[in-house]
Image: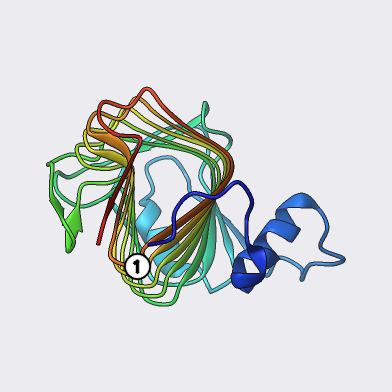
Amino acid sequence: MRLLGARLPLQALPWLLGLVLALSGCQPSAPPNPGVRRVLPGQSIQAVLDQAHPGETVLLPRGTWAENLRIEKSLTLRGEGPEATVLSAAQPGPPVIWVGGEAEVRLEGLTLRAGRGGYVSPLLSSAGVFAQDKARVVLQGVKIQAHAASGVFARDEAQLLLVDGEISGNARYGLELIGRARVVAQSTRIVQNKTGGVWLAEEARLEGEALEVRENGGMGLWVRD
């Protein structure tokens, strides 16, 4: 099991290295945005995501939205900031956002709140974000709060990069990782989750820099083979 480290061994994660460089402004150039779509009041977020082409950005305006989303294509879902754009679960059971396949997804400027139902199996979790297969997910400026399961659940070979975010007040763990899932967390707070801060099993791996894990109801870090 690979555990928390003081520094990020980025050479071992080339995909995450590219993301970190892009987020820090060190990327020399970036391809033009192929398209932007905006969700209108009363419109289904899922319908807009389904219509979007790979690489496009979907803008979610300020307000409180209620949907459970499933994403299997590479795109960006961008809110107006975690204090302005809130997405909560509409149905009990599924996660607020499920990402699978080989999708490369960016979630930016959002609060994900109140996944309901309490499902906690590896096949279904009432989490804020559920990532599986070979999905690659970036969460930048995202708050994940008050879910009936863990804040983030990742399995299989999913890879996640968490930047400038907070995972708090969830019924289970802040992060729950199994299989060969990998998470890199930068400037991220995992606080006040009821069962514990981080749960790792099998070959799951978490690496962090400026990662704060405190005031959780159980252990800050729980590791199982």
Q: Which residue occupies the foreground of this view, 53 or 218?
A: 218
> Which residue position holds label 1?
203
Q: Which residue occupies the foreground of this view, 108 or 186?
A: 186
Relative height, residue 64 to residue 182 (above, below): above
Percent position of residue 225, x then y = 24, 62
Q: Which residue occupies the foreground of this view, 203 or 147?
A: 203
Horizontal side, residue 15 vs residue 129: left or right: right
Relative height, residue 156 to residue 38 (above, below): below
Percent position of residue 49, x then y = 43, 62
- Which SS class for mark 1? loop
Horizontal side, residue 5 vs residue 41: left or right: right
Could you tell me which quadrant the N terminus lies in?
Answer: bottom left
Q: Residues within 10 Å of mark 1 (few under 14, many from 20)?
A: some
Relative height, residue 53 to residue 130 (above, below): below
Horizontal side, residue 127 vs residue 117: left or right: right
The kind of residue tagged 1 is: Glu
Q: Residue at x 30, y 30 (%)?
A: 193
Q: Residue at x 81, y 53 (%)?
A: 25
Residue 198, quarter of picture: top left
Residue 141, quarter of picture: top right
Residue 27, quarter of picture: bottom right
Percent position of residue 201, x then y = 27, 59
